[in-house]
Image (cartoon, helix red, strand yellow):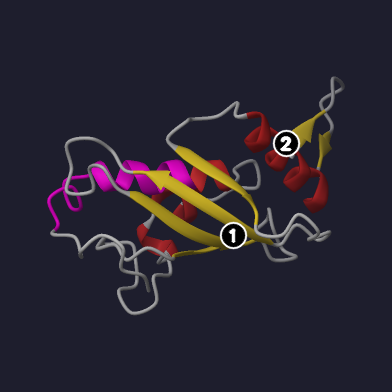
């Protein structure tokens, strides 16, 4: 959602928003501790995304790189993408059976609005790795997947 100079609210279409996010990611204009892009460059509906998070220093996650998959449904950006970890991780906001993010337990998904995007989800997950409830949680051996 954006405002025109006259103050009118304009709702940006899904594909325009996703193309904007893809372009920003490909140019590397965001935080260098996260990355994301399309699973298949031929995905004309911009639905399936890969994500990666370089774990924060000084936590049980230190030195790890976590791989994720995201799905932007036809309701995106009105609703957040569906996100799940491929790499096994122990966090309060992650379902330990499937690797799926529990939306009510992650600040970015709990407080979602259509001005947010994939980058905010990944940054929120990285920030949660540093939270008191997650930073000291024992992690599974590296290389395991859901």
**Which image quarter holds the C terminus?**
bottom left
State whether residue 92 is above or below residue 7.
below
How crowded is the residue under tag 2: few (<14 C-alpha within 10 Å), some, or many (20+)? few
Q: Residue at x 81, y 59 (%)?
A: 42
Give the left or right position of residue 88, taking residue 140 as reference. right
Name which quarter of the figure residue 70 lies in: bottom right
Residue 9 on image: x %, y %: 80, 36
**Which image quarter holds the N terminus?**
top right
56 and 143: which one is in front?
143
Give the left or right position of residue 46, taking residue 64 as reference. right
Find the distance from the CA under tag 2 to the CA under tag 1.
18 Å
**Given this view, does label 2 or label 1 mark the residue nearer the observer?**
2
Which mark, residue 48?
Answer: none
Residue 90 on image: x %, y %: 24, 63
Which region of the structure is painted magenta? 122-137
45 and 14: which one is in front?
45
Q: Residue at x 17, y 36 (%)?
A: 58
State whether residue 54 is above or below residue 139.
above
Residue position marked by numbered label 2 in the rendering: 23
How crowded is the residue under tag 1: few (<14 C-alpha within 10 Å), some, or many (20+)? many
Say which element carries label 1: loop
Give the left or right position of residue 84, taking residue 45 as reference. left
State whether residue 112 is above or below residue 7.
below
Q: Residue at x 60, y 29 (%)?
A: 28
Q: Residue at x 13, y 59 (%)?
A: 138
Name which quarter of the figure residue 87 lies in: bottom left
Q: Residue farthest to the right?
A: 6
- Is residue 22 inside the magenta stretch? no
Q: Is residue 13 visible?
A: no
- Is residue 129 inside the magenta stretch? yes
Residue position marked by numbered label 1 in the rendering: 81
């Amino acid at each position: 959602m954006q405002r025109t100079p006259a103050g009118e609210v304009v709702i940006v279409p899904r594909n325009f928003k996703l193309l904007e996010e893809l372009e920003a990611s490909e140019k590397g204009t965001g935080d260098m501790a996260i990355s994301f892009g399309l699973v298949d460059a031929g995905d004309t509906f911009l639905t399936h995304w890969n994500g990666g998070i370089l774990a924060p220093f000084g936590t049980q996650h230190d030195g790890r790189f976590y791989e994720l998959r995201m799905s932007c449904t036809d309701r995106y950006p009105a609703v957040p993408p569906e996100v799940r970890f491929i790499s096994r991780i122990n966090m309060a906001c992650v379902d330990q059976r499937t690797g799926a993010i529990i939306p009510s337990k992650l600040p970015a998904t709990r407080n979602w609005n259509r001005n947010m995007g994939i980058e905010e989800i990944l940054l929120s997950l990285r920030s949660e790795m540093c939270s008191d409830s997650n930073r000291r949680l024992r992690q599974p051996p590296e290389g395991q997947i859901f």
